[in-house]
Amino acid sequence: MENLFSKYLKGDPILWIVFFVMCIISAIEMYSASSTLAYGADNYAGPMLRHVGFLFGGAIIAIVVHLIPVRYIRMTAYLVLLLSALLLVWVLFRGVSENGASRWLVIMGIKFQPSEFAKLSVIIVAADMISRIRDAKKDEWKYFRNTLIMLAIICTLILFDNFSTAFILFMVVVIMMFIGRVSLLKLGVLVGGLLLTIVLCFALVKTVPEKSMPKMFDRAYTWVGRIDRFKTEKKDEKSKYTITDENRQVQHGRIAIARGGAVGVFPGNSIERDYLPQAYSDFIYAIIVEEMGLFGGIFVILLYLVLLFRAGRIATKCATVFPALLVIGLSLMIVIQAFISMSVATSLGPVTGQPLPLISRGGTSILITCIYFGIIFGVNRQIKEEYQPPIEEDIPIEPEEELSVVDLENL
């Protein structure tokens, strides 16, 4: 095992183990959670094999990416950002709708989410811009402004059909700016302005009828409705025990978690997978708890916490600012999304539609998350190579000549 990590899988071995364990859990739970997909498919093993194929392809991508020098990733991020922005504009007009949201594009038969590429490129470009701040008086406003413009454009394009993703991306970049020591005054004004905008938009949606608003704002009423239902369920005890079309996901998620107990019913024995919509995606954590129990649920949480902790360790060892911010940003994106997904599945938050990174079903999400891991592994690999002491060449030592008796007398 040690030779494997030192030869082919360079970087933090613990993070590699976390990565592969997540892939294994994903494959096992998808086998169970995708029962509804298998029932409707021509080949019952098709959805499972497709998912395993994405995991295998993602693992190959992570291995390849972690061998690419970070400077090349830094250079190409701007091109990916521009391409992502164009695709996000395209998806607004020609996007494929699924579950009431137009987040997908189909090009040459390939279905993908442009927002996943946008998230990756925004984090890399933000890390680059923040790292360029050398003098607070000369550089801070320039790069803060540029980062803000980029966020405003990308997050607005994502916002129309995926509020939660836009919000998570925005807050991750704000945390990166905080770590990068951007002025607290600027960050305070930025966060305050964001909260004020959210409150005003919420009030607008509550007062203006849906028929009077343009069609592009339909998702706003979906978000407000989810928040209202979440608040009502917290206040009204009877609503917790009533299953309707609107709260079917939440209620069956609760039943799945309640059935899990401490040790679960073991993989393959889930019942709620047949009743829980999106059991293989947004609510896969509920199926994990049902089958693996409380201990299994805590184990999955610990995997993400270990990822965040090890990423923080890697960031502290970086000699320059850019790779440190990059590792922090990518790990925060994974972990925050994971905890929001798990909070939804456990009824601690309103439904958001966020998948569990690397575990939920989704081709684009899996492949991009594997790129996240690959970049983190690559940064750690470069750190180890930079601090590796040079190998000293073995200099042959000639044997000392024996002293003769005459030499000894001369001494």
Image (spheres, rainbow, N blue to C red):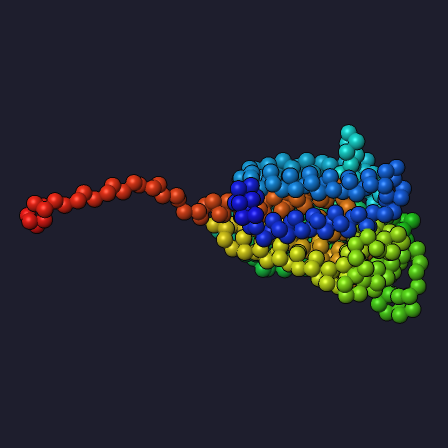
Residue 297 on image: x %, y %: 73, 60
Residue 140 on image: x %, y %: 54, 51
Q: Which residue is drawn at 66% across and 42% down?
A: 59
Q: Which residue is drawn at 89% across and 57% down?
A: 248
Residue 291 on image: x %, y %: 79, 57
Question: Considering depth in this image, is 184 or 232 the residue closer to the camera?
Answer: 232
- Residue 151 lies, with reference to residue 111, above or below; the image says below
Could one spot residue 118 in this view of the protein?
Answer: no
Q: Residue at x 89, y 54 (%)?
A: 275
Question: Considering depth in this image, is 394 or 367 the residue closer to the camera?
Answer: 394
Please state if 398 lies on the left or on the right of 42 as rendered: left
Could one spot residue 296 in this view of the protein?
Answer: yes
Q: Which residue is drawn at 54% across and 48% down?
A: 2
Residue at the front extreme, as displayed: 405
Residue at the top extreme, as displayed: 108
Question: Considering depth in this image, is 326 or 196 the residue closer to the camera?
Answer: 326
Question: Considering depth in this image, is 271 or 373 the residue closer to the camera?
Answer: 271
Residue 398 on image: x %, y %: 25, 41
Please state if 213 lies on the left or on the right of 122 as rendered: right
